[in-house]
Image: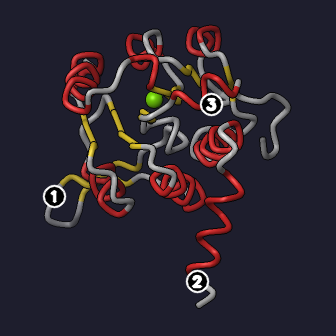
């Protein structure tokens, strides 16, 4: 694993077909910029990490589906999902995430054991408790940290997603191949 002390167990990693990522606090540092335009229209901005985005692409290249599941509704999240080619972007008011993920698993014919989740806070608990690979960011709140089997060394919004993606691919023995193919395609 790059930068981390612990490895994701290979047996857990190899089962994963779907990665569920929380958004606020995982893909971002949990901050939001709230304001209005001069015409009074509400504006909300979030800061996403470009290296995290490449980590998501790496999972997709390895054939692992990525879903964003947020407990808040925000245009910024949808824009970022589109940019990354993440088709499963779910924003659930009041964080009723479980029913959305249950529906996703049914549609994709994926079992709970085949799901990994990277989480940071209590809105993630109901889903995190059920997945096969439970991961938390370095600065996860205590209930999430206690439930997680694996933690990043990096904080949410500051490379935690990239670290998780690389650790997952490394544990599957796929990390080097993904990077090599990427470079080869750009060496022609
Ligand atoms: Mg969160």
The residue at which mark 2 appears reads as 186
Dot in front, 2 or 3: 2
Q: What kind of colouring is applied to the model shown? A: secondary structure
Above or below, comparing residue 130 to residue 34 in the picture: above
- What element does badge 3 sit on? loop
Dot in front, 2 or 1: 2
Above or below, comparing residue 184 to residue 105 in the picture: below
- What element does badge 1 sit on? loop
State which quadrant residue 88 falls in: top left
N-terminal of the pair, mark 2 or mark 3, is 3
The residue at which mark 1 appears reads as 40
Above or below, comparing residue 48 to residue 148 in the picture: below
N-terminal of the pair, mark 1 or mark 3, is 1
The extreme right residue here reads 5
Query: Could you say where residue 91 lies in the image, as x and y percent from the top left?
Result: 25, 35
How many numbered circles does the render carry? 3
Query: Could you say where residue 85 lies in the image, as x and y percent from the top left?
Result: 33, 59
Q: Judge left or right: residue 158 versus residue 54.
A: right
State which quadrant residue 176 falls in: bottom right
Label 2 with label 3: CB-CB less than 8 Å: no
Q: Judge left or right: residue 160 versus residue 77.
A: right
Q: Residue at x 51, y 52 (%)?
A: 62
Query: Could you say where residue 22 lies in the image, as x and y percent from the top left?
Result: 43, 33
The residue at which mark 3 appears reads as 137
Q: Judge left or right: residue 41 versus residue 69.
A: left
CB at disc 3 and ligand 1 closer than 8 Å: no
Looking at the rendered image, the quarter that the N terminus falls into is top right
């Amino acid at each position: 694993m790059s930068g981390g002390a612990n490895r994701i167990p290979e047996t857990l990693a190899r089962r994963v077909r779907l990665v569920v990522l929380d958004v606020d606090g995982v893909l971002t540092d949990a901050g939001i910029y709230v304001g209005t335009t001069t015409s009074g229209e509400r504006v909300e901005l979030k800061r996403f990490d470009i290296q995290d985005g490449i980590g998501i692409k790496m999972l997709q290249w390895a054939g692992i589906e990525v879903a964003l599941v947020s407990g808040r509704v925000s245009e910024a999240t949808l824009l970022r999902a589109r940019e990354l080619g993440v088709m499963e972007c779910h924003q659930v008011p009041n964080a009723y995430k479980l029913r959305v993920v249950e529906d996703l698993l049914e549609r994709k014919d994926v079992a709970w054991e085949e799901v990994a989740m990277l989480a940071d806070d209590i809105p993630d608990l109901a889903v995190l408790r059920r997945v096969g690979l439970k991961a938390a960011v370095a600065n996860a709140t205590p209930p999430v940290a206690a439930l997680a089997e694996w933690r990043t060394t990096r904080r949410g919004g500051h490379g935690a997603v990239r670290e998780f993606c690389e650790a997952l691919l490394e544990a599957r023995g796929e990390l080097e191949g993904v990077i090599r193919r990427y470079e080869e395609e750009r060496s022609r």
